[in-house]
Amino acid sequence: MIDKKFKDNFKNRLVKFSLEIINFCDTLENKRKFWIISDQLIRASTSIGANIIEAKSSSSRKDYIKFFQIALKSANETEYWLILVRELISDEEKVNHLLTELNEIACIIGSSLLTLKGKKIKD
Protein backbone atom coordinates (compact mmCIF):
# COMPACT_ATOMS: atom_id res chain seq x y z
CA MET A 1 0.00 0.00 0.00
CA ILE A 2 3.00 2.31 0.31
CA ASP A 3 3.13 2.53 -3.49
CA LYS A 4 -0.53 3.61 -3.73
CA LYS A 5 -0.07 6.10 -0.91
CA PHE A 6 3.02 7.55 -2.61
CA LYS A 7 1.17 7.84 -5.93
CA ASP A 8 -1.78 9.57 -4.27
CA ASN A 9 0.52 11.95 -2.41
CA PHE A 10 2.42 12.69 -5.61
CA LYS A 11 -0.79 13.46 -7.51
CA ASN A 12 -1.87 15.79 -4.71
CA ARG A 13 1.55 17.42 -4.81
CA LEU A 14 1.19 18.00 -8.56
CA VAL A 15 -2.22 19.61 -8.07
CA LYS A 16 -0.85 21.81 -5.28
CA PHE A 17 2.09 22.85 -7.47
CA SER A 18 -0.23 23.75 -10.36
CA LEU A 19 -2.38 25.84 -8.03
CA GLU A 20 0.70 27.58 -6.63
CA ILE A 21 1.78 28.50 -10.16
CA ILE A 22 -1.70 29.75 -11.09
CA ASN A 23 -1.91 31.87 -7.94
CA PHE A 24 1.64 33.14 -8.45
CA CYS A 25 0.81 34.24 -12.00
CA ASP A 26 -2.13 36.20 -10.62
CA THR A 27 0.36 38.24 -8.57
CA LEU A 28 2.39 39.31 -11.59
CA GLU A 29 1.95 42.82 -12.85
CA ASN A 30 -0.63 43.27 -15.60
CA LYS A 31 1.99 44.25 -18.15
CA ARG A 32 2.46 42.95 -21.66
CA LYS A 33 5.78 41.29 -20.81
CA PHE A 34 4.04 38.98 -18.32
CA TRP A 35 1.01 38.05 -20.43
CA ILE A 36 2.70 35.44 -22.61
CA ILE A 37 5.06 34.29 -19.87
CA SER A 38 2.26 33.65 -17.36
CA ASP A 39 0.14 31.95 -20.02
CA GLN A 40 3.00 29.64 -21.00
CA LEU A 41 3.96 29.05 -17.37
CA ILE A 42 0.43 27.98 -16.47
CA ARG A 43 0.15 25.76 -19.56
CA ALA A 44 3.50 24.04 -18.98
CA SER A 45 3.13 23.58 -15.23
CA THR A 46 -0.41 22.19 -15.38
CA SER A 47 0.65 19.86 -18.19
CA ILE A 48 2.98 18.06 -15.77
CA GLY A 49 0.19 16.76 -13.57
CA ALA A 50 -2.25 16.33 -16.43
CA ASN A 51 0.10 13.96 -18.24
CA ILE A 52 0.87 11.96 -15.10
CA ILE A 53 -2.86 11.53 -14.47
CA GLU A 54 -3.54 10.76 -18.13
CA ALA A 55 -0.91 8.01 -18.06
CA LYS A 56 -3.34 5.98 -15.94
CA SER A 57 -5.51 5.32 -18.96
CA SER A 58 -2.67 4.32 -21.26
CA SER A 59 -3.26 1.45 -23.63
CA SER A 60 0.29 0.09 -23.34
CA ARG A 61 3.48 0.36 -21.32
CA LYS A 62 5.04 2.33 -24.19
CA ASP A 63 2.12 4.77 -24.11
CA TYR A 64 2.40 5.03 -20.31
CA ILE A 65 6.10 5.90 -20.59
CA LYS A 66 5.33 8.49 -23.27
CA PHE A 67 3.03 10.40 -20.88
CA PHE A 68 5.80 10.48 -18.27
CA GLN A 69 8.25 11.74 -20.89
CA ILE A 70 5.86 14.52 -21.85
CA ALA A 71 5.42 15.41 -18.17
CA LEU A 72 9.21 15.66 -17.77
CA LYS A 73 9.45 17.86 -20.86
CA SER A 74 6.73 20.10 -19.42
CA ALA A 75 8.71 20.32 -16.18
CA ASN A 76 11.75 21.45 -18.17
CA GLU A 77 9.67 24.06 -19.97
CA THR A 78 8.21 25.24 -16.66
CA GLU A 79 11.74 25.71 -15.35
CA TYR A 80 12.58 27.97 -18.29
CA TRP A 81 9.54 30.19 -17.73
CA LEU A 82 10.20 30.42 -13.98
CA ILE A 83 13.81 31.44 -14.58
CA LEU A 84 12.62 34.09 -17.01
CA VAL A 85 10.13 35.45 -14.47
CA ARG A 86 12.78 35.43 -11.75
CA GLU A 87 14.91 37.72 -13.92
CA LEU A 88 12.00 40.14 -14.41
CA ILE A 89 10.66 40.48 -10.85
CA SER A 90 12.03 41.28 -7.44
CA ASP A 91 10.41 38.37 -5.52
CA GLU A 92 13.20 35.86 -6.15
CA GLU A 93 12.35 33.97 -2.95
CA LYS A 94 8.93 32.87 -4.23
CA VAL A 95 10.29 31.84 -7.63
CA ASN A 96 13.15 29.94 -5.99
CA HIS A 97 10.61 28.09 -3.83
CA LEU A 98 8.68 27.12 -6.97
CA LEU A 99 11.91 26.06 -8.71
CA THR A 100 12.87 23.86 -5.75
CA GLU A 101 9.48 22.15 -5.76
CA LEU A 102 9.66 21.76 -9.54
CA ASN A 103 13.11 20.20 -9.30
CA GLU A 104 11.87 17.64 -6.77
CA ILE A 105 8.88 16.81 -8.97
CA ALA A 106 11.12 16.46 -12.04
CA CYS A 107 13.48 14.15 -10.13
CA ILE A 108 10.57 11.89 -9.14
CA ILE A 109 9.34 11.76 -12.73
CA GLY A 110 12.86 11.15 -14.06
CA SER A 111 13.42 8.37 -11.54
CA SER A 112 10.07 6.84 -12.47
CA LEU A 113 11.04 6.92 -16.13
CA LEU A 114 14.30 5.12 -15.41
CA THR A 115 12.41 2.48 -13.48
CA LEU A 116 9.79 2.10 -16.21
CA LYS A 117 12.51 1.68 -18.81
CA GLY A 118 14.38 -0.81 -16.65
CA LYS A 119 17.39 1.48 -16.35
CA LYS A 120 17.17 2.24 -12.63
CA ILE A 121 20.63 2.32 -11.07
CA LYS A 122 20.74 0.17 -7.97
CA ASP A 123 22.04 1.83 -4.78
Image (tube, rainbow, N blue to C red):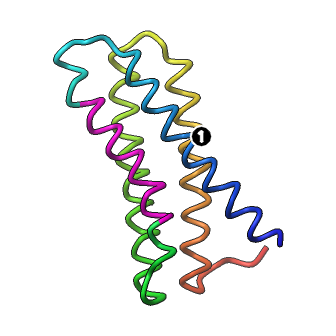
Residue 48 location (% of width, % of height): 44, 54
Residue lying furthest right: 1
Amino acid under disc 1 = Glu
Labels in figure, total: 1
Q: Residue at x 53, y 43 (%)?
A: 102
Residue 70 located within the stretch drawn in magenta:
no
Which of the pair 16/105 is nearer the observer?
16
Report the quarter where the C terminus lies. Answer: bottom right
Residue 42 located within the stretch drawn in magenta:
yes
User: Which class describes the residues within 10 Å of circle 1: few (<14), some (14-19), or many (20+)?
Assistant: some
Which of the pair 24/119 is nearer the observer?
24
Q: Which residues are magenta?
A: 37-53
Q: Secondary structure at mark 1?
A: helix
Q: Residue at x 75, y 78 (%)?
A: 122
Q: Is residue 59 left or right of residue 106?
A: left
Report the quarter where the N terminus lies. Answer: bottom right
Residue lying furthest bottom: 60
Q: Residue beneath label 1, please? A: 101
Q: In which image quadrant can residue 120 be found?
A: bottom right
Residue 49 location (% of width, % of height): 48, 55
